[in-house]
Image (cartoon, rainbow, N blue to C red):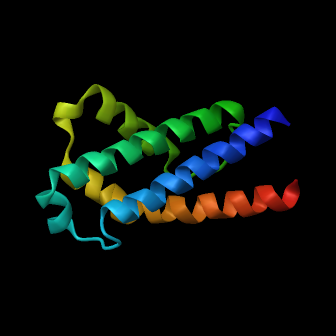
Amino acid sequence: MENELKILKYLFDINTSINAIDHHLSYKRSYHFYIANLTVQRAVERELEIIGEAISKLLKIDVSIQITYARLIIDLRNKIIHSYDNINNDVIWKILVKDIPVLKEEVAFLINNFSTNQ
């Protein structure tokens, strides 16, 4: 039961960070807006750190949880934390527009599926 609660917590943490990314980007996907605002970049990077850490913890509890870009997001989290001076905004942006929407759908599915199976 304790692991199930942790799994649900991490899923909600990921969902919260995804929603916060949307908020930081003013609910629009504008590369120019993102690049022009260092504060937005740092806020988005922080949310990506949280997402990467939560995914890492999730997979330590249950390796069978299916998250398409899990390894990529965990690796990104590590890069942001340990190699902050080598962050490529184009890579971050690609993740924001390509990978995060997929993650958002998968997390919503996992939360809904988790809730109905309990």
Toward the bottom, the furthest residue is 28
The residue shown at (49%, 50%) is 69
The residue shown at (51%, 45%) is 70
Q: Position of residue 61 (x, y in %)?
A: 70, 32
Q: Position of residue 77 (x, y in %)?
A: 39, 37
Asked whether 109 or 27 is in front, the reply is 27
The residue shown at (24%, 29%) is 83
Compared to 78, does 46 lie above or below?
below
Residue 30 seen in this snapshot: yes
Q: Position of residue 60 (x, y in %)?
A: 65, 30
* Location of the N terminus (image quadrant): top right
Residue 64 seen in this snapshot: no
Horizontal side of residue 92 vs 117, given as left or right:
left
The residue shown at (52%, 58%) is 103
Horizontal side of residue 48 vs 117, given as left or right:
left
Horizontal side of residue 66 vs 102, given as left or right:
right
Q: Position of residue 80 (x, y in %)?
A: 30, 35
